[in-house]
Amino acid sequence: MGSRKEKITKFIQMEEEDDDELFLVIVPAILECLNEEKRLEHTSEYTSAKKVKEILEGHENWCKSEFRMKTRIFKETCNYLRHEGLLRDTRGVTIEEQLGMFMYMISHNASNDRLKKAFQHSGETVHRHIRVVFNIIPTLTYRFLKLPTSNQTHPKIATDPRFWPLFSVLFFSQNCIGAIDGTHVPITIAEEKAPPYRNRKGTLSQNVMVACDFNLNFTFISCGWEGSTSDAGVLRSAISKGFQVPEGKFYLVDGGYANAPQFLMPYRGVRYHIAEFQRRSSRRREYADHKELFNHRHALLRNHIERAIGILKKRFQILKVGTHHPIESQIKIPAATVVFHNIIRCLNGDENWLDHQPTYIPESDHVDLPQGDDNHQNDVQSLNLQDHAANVLRDQIAMQMWERYNQSRA
């Protein structure tokens, strides 16, 4: 028995010695980790404040490249946001930095990680301030997208004999105030929610409806509709949610919409696109009848919406690629680009310099998207019921055009 007790005692002593040795190894390692200074992620002296300051005080091309607008316009936009209380300087991030991060993001499709590196802020700080700007987009949309209210005919119509007075208020108590079209913007969404967003090209997109005036300012936008939704379906939904055309006014639309007194479309089955008329070899254009003449002049005016969309996507190429923002932010991205497009034009900005800017988003990343509906799918019954009145109005305008056209040739 004594021998067995000695063995047990010896075993316990050996275990205690092993525990002591383990303790002597682990504790110093833990203390070393606790005492080790945390390695900073953002160690560059080129801080966000310095970056934005250098851009705004440097060559004009820097601001055009990074923020897609001239320096003067960027500064005036910041002053407006500050004066209106829409954005505020925080302890670590000025309004200039906040807007700079947002404009850089929508101009370059910059991810959160890329913004962290470019502006030397934590991911949480970048996310928080990008979200703050996204949150004011509805307010800016309300302020800077306005339907025309004047009863005066737009100078583009009033000063051009091809359109005056046939698209004006004088003849038919109607007044053309702009054009409407749909444009697809890529969207990234969970696979189980993706089917409605799959467009006829097989890619994922939202169908965005926009309206513009003849100054290339956007007057309305409706975002977030699934890519499988027709242009006319988006218009119907917009109307049901409050979009109204002022009494006595109408927009020009293409063949993807129903013909209605408020939305005048070209004649079907008749040449329409501008390029089809430009291919004619004769120096003096000849038209087969009043329908061809109407379609050509309708196309010349409606081309404003195509130009506006083209400028928008050239300035903000994020509209051509998929992003990984939350879905609610993805839906706001088209509205954000339209708002800043209007602000730029409101401050007498231009877009001619965009043709000379390098492409920061490779074309290989661009998503293949539909160009819009070519034909109305008769899926909007409320608009289909108005086609007779719209056909009468269109015929009256076309015949008046035809009569004046023949008089000018006599």
Image: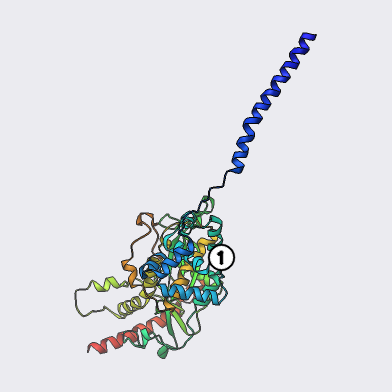
**Res. 321 in view:** yes
Q: How many marks?
A: 1
* Left or right: 129, with 282 as reference point: right
Image x and y of residue 253, in percent: 41, 74
* Left or right: 394, with 147 as reference point: left
Three-letter amino acid code at the position of disc 1: Val
Quadrant where the C terminus sits is bottom left
User: Which of these two is toward me, 400 or 326?
Assistant: 326
The residue carrying pointer 1 sits among few (fewer than 14), some (14 to 19) or many (20 or more) residues within 10 Å by Cα, namely some
User: Which of these two is toward me, 89 or 237?
Assistant: 89
Quadrant where the N terminus sits is top right
Which residue is at the far right? Answer: 1
**In which image quadrant can residue 279 be found?**
bottom left
- Please tell me whether residue 296 is drawn above or below residue 2 in the rendered image: below
Image x and y of residue 210, in percent: 45, 71
Residue occupied by mark 1: 132
- Tell me the colour scheme of the image: rainbow
Q: Circle 1 — which element?
A: helix
Image x and y of residue 154, in percent: 40, 85
User: Which of these two is toward me, 328 or 57?
Assistant: 57
**Res. 229 in view:** no
**In which image quadrant can residue 158 be found?**
bottom left
Which residue is at the far left? Answer: 282
Image x and y of residue 306, in percent: 37, 71
- Please tell me whether residue 87 is drawn above or below residue 214 in the rendered image: above
Residue at point 26%, 78% (across, down): 288
- Please tell me whether residue 17 is drawn above or below residue 228 in the rendered image: above
